[in-house]
Image (cartoon, grey):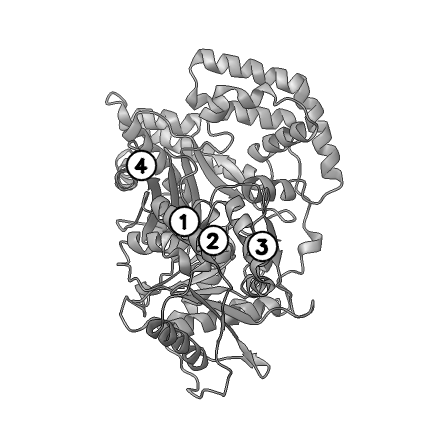
Amino acid sequence: MENQLAKSTEERTFQYQDSLPSLPVPSLEESLKKYLESVKPFANKEEYKRTKETVQKFQDGIGRKLHQKLLERAKGKRNWLEEWWLNCAYLDVRLPSQLNVNFAGPATHIEHYWPPKEGTQLERGSISLWHNLNYWQLLRKEKVPVDKSGNSPLDMNQFRMLFSTCRIPGITRDSITSYFRTESEGHSPTHIAVLCRGRVFVFDVIHEGCLITPPEIYRQLTYIHKKCQSEPDGPGIAALTSEERTQWAKAREYLISLDPENLTILEKVQSSLLVYTIEDSSPHVTPEDYSQATTMTLIGDPAVRWGDKSYNLISFSNGVFGCSCDHAPFDAMAMVNISHYVDEKVFENEGRWKGSEKVRDISLPEELVFTVDDKILNDINQAKARYLKQASDLQVVAYAFTSFGKKLTKKKMLHPDTFIQLGLQLAYYRLYGRPGSCYETATTRYFYHGRTETMRTCTVEALGWCQSMQDPSTGLLERQQKMLQAFAKHNKMMKDFSAGKGFDRHLLGLLLIAKEEGLPVPELFTDPLFSKSGGGGNFVLSTSLIGYLRTLGVVVPMVHNGYGFFYQIRDDRFVVACSAWKSCPETDAEKLVLLVFQAFNDMMQLMNTAHL
């Protein structure tokens, strides 16, 4: 990372933003052809015939008109989807976002110098914070390397939202406020907020023009920790951020009406670089089993998380770390980048601070005390109760598959991401005897402000292969051929969809144009196969590759009877985090993960035994 950063001095983080191509609008015929193919695994002949007629009718009629209007819209915007996506995927959603939208995950320092150990929380925390703050400084100086695919720069806009960014609840639609500025753009906030036992503190991280050191951060954290341990807990205003969005917007308005000073305090939290959480709990964690640590990052104490912040850095009592992030301003890859940077720094320095122990005379942290009344305290208690009720329904399993990893799959000429996706398809098919509609994230960061596209990985080829694996009369050679066909299809789709040739976001655009024009919802979107195949956010498998680094994370399932499935790929292992709702009698995250691991072994065996 250091060499990369040194090399990047000529290249500034955001220098290519103005030259990135605009997000293209795919051709209507191509999108509808791909859509039809994606519904095939879920339809019998009769259903497919009906849907084909519906699609044709759409293509020849209203669809063409909507597509023309979409092309008109795209002419005036570098990214025709950006505002729509932000609103309909995030800001208009009224569900409590802290649990239903945020992504969270544990840090992997436990695999090297920081295994769980009581009494290390504050010392390790000061080092972790210091590395995070160094990254913030690199970002302000635009020295974070530009992500590239080959030689093509990718959009870096999301990195602007890592620090000093917060979602603000609204009655019908939330908004995002970012206070971050690069050095060349001007002043950026320099304080962090610390939440501990329902209380809120802030302190500045710049003293006399330079970053405070780990021993100085340690003094600030110790002051806060001791104060909170020897005095009563605070009201836990932060718990309100875990509420249903309109509810929280109303509570926030009421809070501000009680005392204008409350608004000043809220703005201090909103503009803080990040929220640092001091948790009292100690999750169990090993390199092979991250289940409890992953769960606790997503569903820990709501009184010490600011659910709306783009970055909550979480510290547990046993020196384990993690994060919880609002998903609206950025996708996980921005957080993966900083998490990897911090993990590498902890590793390089053997988990220690090797600089001066001198502590300068820095002003102590300031406590932010809200003016509250019985109504607000009652709102907080209700919010906590609701949050904990839903949180207790979540099952998260995060295990490492250690028999092999990327090295061996590559040796067999199999793409590791495709390998995992097909393993998941086979596991789901074995568990339910039917195909599972699946969403895999494809990136569109080749384009200006590009974020994601849906890749529907339950293909006709994948289903054909799953059926052959369960059919005793199918020979090994045929199974292998069908598997390789499914691989080829998946790989081609990923290439196409990242190049702006997906269809789900295109269909969403056409639907939103119809709504804006006050037209009835076209039949294409009310056809039963639309939602059965996952359309309209109905995928039973919501999945994403977190990357090829030591970083892990999880999001809740997209639907009640579904799974969230997220994975990292390493040379010698695959680590999988899977979520499900306990109240759904059909789903079991642990059972699914173990079946996925079995599928991995079966797939590798197939490659070893079926000689072409």
Label 4, label 2: how many angstroms apart (C-alpha)? 31 Å
The furthest residue to the top = 46
Classify mark 3: residues with Cα within 10 Å, few (<14), some (14-19) or many (20+).
Answer: some
In front: label 4 or label 2: 2
- Helix, strand or loop at mark 4: loop
- Helix, strand or loop at mark 3: helix
Nearer-N-terminus badge (2/3): 3
Label 3, label 4: how many angstroms apart (C-alpha)? 35 Å
Vertical placement of 26 versus 551: above or below? above
Name the mark on residue 375.
2
Instruction: Please give the residue where the numbered disc 3 appears in the rendered image.
Output: 158
Instruction: Please give the residue where the numbered disc 1 appears in the rendered image.
Output: 382
Classify mark 4: residues with Cα within 10 Å, few (<14), some (14-19) or many (20+).
Answer: some
Nearer-N-terminus badge (3/1): 3
Label 1, label 2: how many angstroms apart (C-alpha)? 11 Å
Q: Quadrant of the C terminus?
A: top left
Q: Amino acid at mark 3?
A: Gln
Residue 81: % across, % down: 64, 40
Q: Between residue 370 and residue 514, name the one nearer to us.
A: 370
User: Could you tell me if the residues under marks 4 and 2 are in contact, i.e. CB atoms within 8 Å?
Assistant: no
**Which quadrant holds residue 287?**
bottom left
Q: Between residue 545 and residue 416, name the one nearer to us.
A: 545
Label 1, label 4: how many angstroms apart (C-alpha)? 21 Å
Label 2, label 3: how many angstroms apart (C-alpha)? 37 Å
Instruction: Please give the residue where the numbered disc 4 appears in the rendered image.
Output: 583
In front: label 2 or label 3: 2
Q: Amino acid at mark 2?
A: Lys
Q: Report whether 176 appears left or right of 460.
A: right
Q: Between residue 541 and residue 442, name the one nearer to us.
A: 541
